[in-house]
Image (cartoon, grey):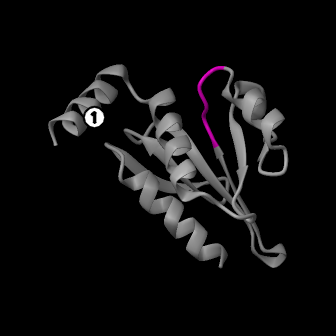
Amino acid sequence: MTDDRIERLRRICLALPEVTERISHGQPAWFVREKKQFVMATEFPQEGRVHLRCAAPDGVQSLLVEADPEKFFIPPYVGHRGWLGVRLDVPTDWDEIADLVEDAWRTVAPKRLAAEYDATRHDS
């Protein structure tokens, strides 16, 4: 079950432009242009827990944590930078996860890359 969630998260992340994956701190993580991390998965397989940590636009972290503290949390180590924690071991809206991942990507992606991505999406 945990692997399925990580695989779904992987597909969402890797669908964005110039994203690569590598292990960071023992966990799967995704980077823009191999430099700027925007999402990290954290698994606790023996407990059946899995969550993601992601960059978030200014103000989003506190809004979501206050709105639904059962699903969203301030993650250790990166929470002070505005990153958001999202539990994936609760009922998960994968469209919402895709939106959060895209927002995280936009938070760290170069402006020109984000603009090119937007242009290709509007052309299709």
Q: Mark 1: which amino acid?
A: Tyr
Residue 119: % across, % down: 21, 30
Give the side of residue 17 with respect to residue 71, left or right.
Answer: left
- Measured along the vertical axis of the image, is residue 51 above or below residue 35? below
Q: Secondary structure at mark 1?
A: helix
**Image point 73% across, 44% down: which residue?**
85
Relative placement, left or right, of 98 versus 61 is: left
Residue 61 quadrant: top right
Q: Residue at x 29, y 22 (%)?
A: 112
Q: Residue at left 35%, top 53%?
A: 15
Q: Is residue 36 visible?
A: no
Note whether residue 7 is visible. Answer: yes
Nearer to the camera, 38 or 70: 70
Q: Is residue 96 above or below residue 10?
A: above
Looking at the image, which is closer to me, 71 or 14?
71
Q: Position of residue 116 (x, y in %)?
A: 24, 29
Residue 76: percent from left, percent from top: 82, 41
Q: Is residue 8 above or below residue 30?
A: below
Is-magenta flag for residue 81?
no
On the rendered image, what quadrant is the C terminus found in? top left
Q: Residue furthest left?
A: 123
Q: How many marks?
A: 1
**Residue highlighted by disc 1:** 117
Give the image quarter of residue 41. Answer: bottom right
Q: Which residues are magenta?
A: 54-58
Q: Residues within 10 Å of mark 1 (few under 14, many from 20)?
A: few
Residue 93 located left or right of residue 76: left
